[in-house]
Amino acid sequence: MKRYLPLFASAAICAALPVSAQEAKTYPAPSEIFAAAKADNWVAIAPSDILVMDLAPDSKGKPRRVIIQLMPAPFSQGWVSNIRKLAAAHWWDGTSINRVQDNYVVQWGDATEKKALPDGLAVVDAKDYVTPDWPTKDWILARADGRPDAYAGAHGFYLGWPLAQGREGLWPVHCYGMVGVGRNLSPDTGTGAELYTVIGHAPRHLDRNIALVGRVIEGIEHMSSLPRGTGALGFYEKEEDRVPILSVRLGNAAKDVPAFEFLSTDSDSFAAYADARANRRDAFFNIPAGGADICNIPVPIRRKGN
């Protein structure tokens, strides 16, 4: 388990150093750490694990594309399988973004709730919000701030994803850009036809109450900058306010999709990056925070070759 030096201890050590030594020491910013990571520290994202959503062009005629990485096994796979089937059936074509709630979520799907779903979608049980399967080799139980998680027993990263841990197992967490499945009241768990992404402060109270199925890795600005809905919960009240969805395809079925990769959370580079996020010591900062919420340690993702 990675442990962090308490803030007061760090300050005491710095105070004991000569002024010249303190001034001579420089620390890289988090962005500089992952920019310097070796090529073998990066993990390719398979095109088949990417969802490509093309929205209608903006008011200036510019195209708007949103790229989503789907959640890997063993998490949320019943819903992820449904999403693959919906994309293959082109089900989202002609639907819309119909909800934009400030500091919360953007939601999309069939606003009329009348469009027939394709055959063969699974009905997933709520118990699958949590997986009891415990990863071993690649599971890093690293408390990002050295303190217990406010919403769980602990948190860490697995295969590039932020997770929380409790006695019942592991579950993905609602960080900025995460994509979840809209649902009605329990026992409904949603099919995956209605999706949302987080555009505000991490709503961790939703963890284990809704299925998380992925994260936006490019183009979230096309959602977060949309006008807020004026109806209840941020729904658009007029049809003309909704943002048309032209198409949604898996990455291996879409055109002109760049290759993406993420920084391995099992790498030394990521460990250094996470520490730097929790304890900013680069030029702008005077006092390291001494900790960071797991959602304030976003896993670096980039276009391959950049």
Image: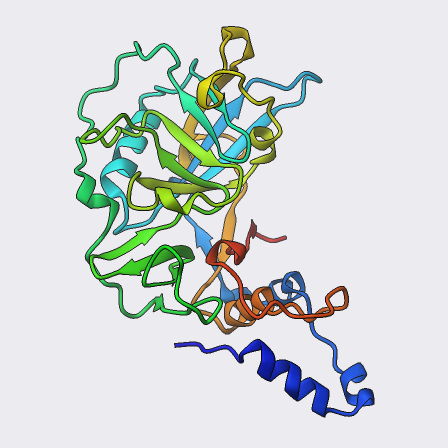
Residue at image location 40% in from the left, 61% down from the top: 149
Number of labels in the image equals 0
* Residue 14 falls left or right of residue 173: right
Q: Is residue 21 above or below residue 99?
A: below
In the picture as drawn, the residue positioned furthest to the right comes out as 20
Query: In the rendered image, which quarter is residue 90 located in?
Result: top left
Residue 138 figure quarter: bottom left
Question: Residue 65's x, y, as percent?
Answer: 55, 29
Image spot of residue 258 (x, y percent): 54, 41
Residue 38 in view, yes or no: no
Percent x, y of residue 291: 54, 67
Q: At which x and y percent is residue 74? A: 25, 51
Above or below, 106 against 129 in this view is: above
Along the viewing direction, whichever of 216 and 100 lies nearer the viewer: 100
The quadrant in which the N terminus is found is bottom left
Residue in the foreground of this view, choosing between 70 and 163:
163
Q: Is residue 219 left or right of residue 90?
A: right
Rendering colour mode: rainbow
User: Toward which corner of the image does residue 49 lie, by quadrant?
Assistant: top left
Residue drawn where x is 31% and y is 38% of the image: 210
- Residue 203 at least partly seen: yes
Q: Is residue 283 above or below residue 195?
A: below
